[in-house]
Image (spheres, grey):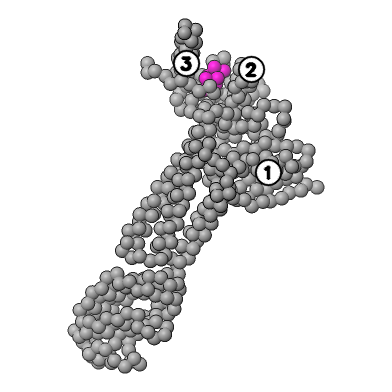
């Protein structure tokens, strides 16, 4: 009966040699990779044979037929492929044969070409993240929120890690299997996946309330709280800076007011003609109510947006 | 004719093997090992990249074999400009060797 096992692992692209070494070591102990994927490996147990493994990076392979034929002819069996263009190969190991026969790239020039393919893609990704960074930075300058600050930090971190990877891919001599690099690799995936999901969740949970309102009041709105007009309520799911744009144009001054859960006034403006842009409000988690009050009557037109 | 860049060992041996007639990747690799007495090995990744690049340069062409036993197998064949590139490299190497002996 055949024995199998599955492992979950994280390897960064610039440390692909480490992945190869790990697969070779496991094969020497009888566990042979039979399916390689980005984050998981499947192994089969057979103590009688030993394989040597190699990884190849071929994103956007244009001639898959010629590719696999060339590898197959030299005894390479493909045992996996990742979504982003890494291919896993293995060859039965015979210690009497020269070492070079267990390498896919036998000269520095072609190895550089392979590393160069990764560098090219990583450079494009850095540029994409830098564009995101600049777009969010512009937004941050006009409306500084903690959410945007977290996004900026994430974009910068991702671009930084790719830059670090490019440096190592281009100067393989600088590579060393250090704990720092392992931690960095782990952190990178955590930030990339956790950060992206977290960001989308925060964005999705972010409330916004707006209103475009115009009416003729024949009766006044009194000062007593029981008779105020409630325009809206807004549910704030997490504490952050929120921004208010407000425009009042009325025949008489009117009181525009935002109250929190406890009934405390967070914002108030009593004007007949008023314009406010980008007013920063530090709001905690809770329900906020937006009221109009203390208006003697007449035409009232009001626009606001809070987000 | 523009001055040609020195060729990598793998490129040179691939062209050299093909000058004897069409061959497939594995055949080129075996012939290279035999010619060089095991000194030069061309791995599959290197072979795929080099043949791809040389097809782009127009030095070699892909043909499908119809020989018995090798039906439908991919073979590479040298083009006229490939032969020219090889000739240029050989004369460069000869010149270097001659210069070395002079010194």
Looking at the image, is A296 positioned above or below residue B40? below
Decide: is B77 above or below A250.
above
Judging from the image, mark 2 belongs to the subunit labelled B
Q: Secondary structure at mark 3?
A: helix
Q: Residues within 10 Å of mark 3 (few under 14, many from 20)?
A: some
Q: Name the secondary structure under disc 1.
A: strand
Q: Look at discs 3 and 2 and give the one toward the viewer.
A: 2
- Other residues around mark 2 within 10 Å, as few (<14) / some (14–19) / many (≥20): few
> Mark 3 sits on what residue?
B89
The Cα–Cα distance between marks 1 and 3, rounded to whole angstroms, is: 43 Å
Residue A70's quadrant in the figure?
top right
Q: Spatial distance from mark 3 to mark 2, Cα to Cα?
A: 21 Å
- Callout 1: chain: A
Viewer-proximal residue, B103 or A142? Answer: B103
Q: Residues within 10 Å of mark 1 (few under 14, many from 20)?
A: many
Q: Which residue is mark 2?
A: B37
Give the percent coordinates (x, y) of residue B14: 55, 21
Vertical order, A102 against A305 (above or below):
above
Residue, x 47% and y 12% (percent of image)?
B96
**Mark found first going from the N terminus, 3 or 2:** 2
As helix, strand or loop, the secondary structure at mark 2 comes to loop
Going 43% across and 57% down the picture, which residue do you hit?
Answer: A153
> Would residue A141 be seen by someone viewing this image from the given angle?
yes
Which residue was labeled with disc 1? A33
């Amino acid at each position: 009966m055949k024995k199998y096992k599955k492992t979950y692992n994280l390897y960064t692209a610039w440390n692909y040699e480490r992945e190869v070494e790990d697969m070779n070591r496991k094969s020497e102990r009888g566990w042979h990779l039979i399916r390689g994927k980005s984050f998981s490996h499947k192994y089969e147990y057979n103590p009688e044979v030993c394989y040597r493994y190699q990884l190849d990076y071929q994103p956007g392979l244009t001639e898959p037929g010629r590719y696999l034929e060339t590898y197959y002819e030299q005894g390479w069996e493909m045992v996996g492929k990742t979504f982003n263009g890494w291919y896993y190969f293995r060859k039965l190991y015979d210690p009497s044969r020269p070492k070079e026969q267990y390498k896919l790239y036998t000269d520095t020039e072609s190895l550089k070409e392979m590393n160069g393919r990764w560098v090219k893609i990583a450079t494009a990704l850095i540029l994409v993240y830098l564009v995101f960074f600049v777009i969010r930075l512009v937004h941050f300058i006009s409306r500084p929120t903690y959410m945007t600050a977290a996004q900026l930090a994430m974009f910068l971190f991702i671009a930084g890690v790719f830059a670090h990877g490019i440096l190592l891919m281009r100067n393989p001599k600088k590579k060393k299997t250090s704990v720092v690099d392992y931690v960095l690799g782990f952190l990178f995936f955590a930030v990339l996946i956790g950060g992206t999901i977290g960001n989308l969740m925060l964005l999705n949970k972010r409330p916004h309330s707006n209103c475009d309102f115009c009416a003729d009041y024949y009766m006044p709105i009194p000062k007593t709280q029981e008779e105020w007009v409630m325009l809206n309520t807004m549910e704030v799911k997490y504490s952050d800076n929120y921004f208010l744009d407000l425009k009042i144009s009325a025949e008489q001054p009117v009181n525009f007011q935002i109250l929190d859960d406890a009934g405390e006034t967070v914002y108030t403006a009593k004007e007949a003609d008023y314009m406010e842009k980008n007013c920063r409000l530090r709001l905690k988690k809770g329900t906020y109510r937006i009221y109009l009050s203390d208006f003697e009557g007449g035409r009232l037109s009001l626009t606001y947006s809070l987000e | 004719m523009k001055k040609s860049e020195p060729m990598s060992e793998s490129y040179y041996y691939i062209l050299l093997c093909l000058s004897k007639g069409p061959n497939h990747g594995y055949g080129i690799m075996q012939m290279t090992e035999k010619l060089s007495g095991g000194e030069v090995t061309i791995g599959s990744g290197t072979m795929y990249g080099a043949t791809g690049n040389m097809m782009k340069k127009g030095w070699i062409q892909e043909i499908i074999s119809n020989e018995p036993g090798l039906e439908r197998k991919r073979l590479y064949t040298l083009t006229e400009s490939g032969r020219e590139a090889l000739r240029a490299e050989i004369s460069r190497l000869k010149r270097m060797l001659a210069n070395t002996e002079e010194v």
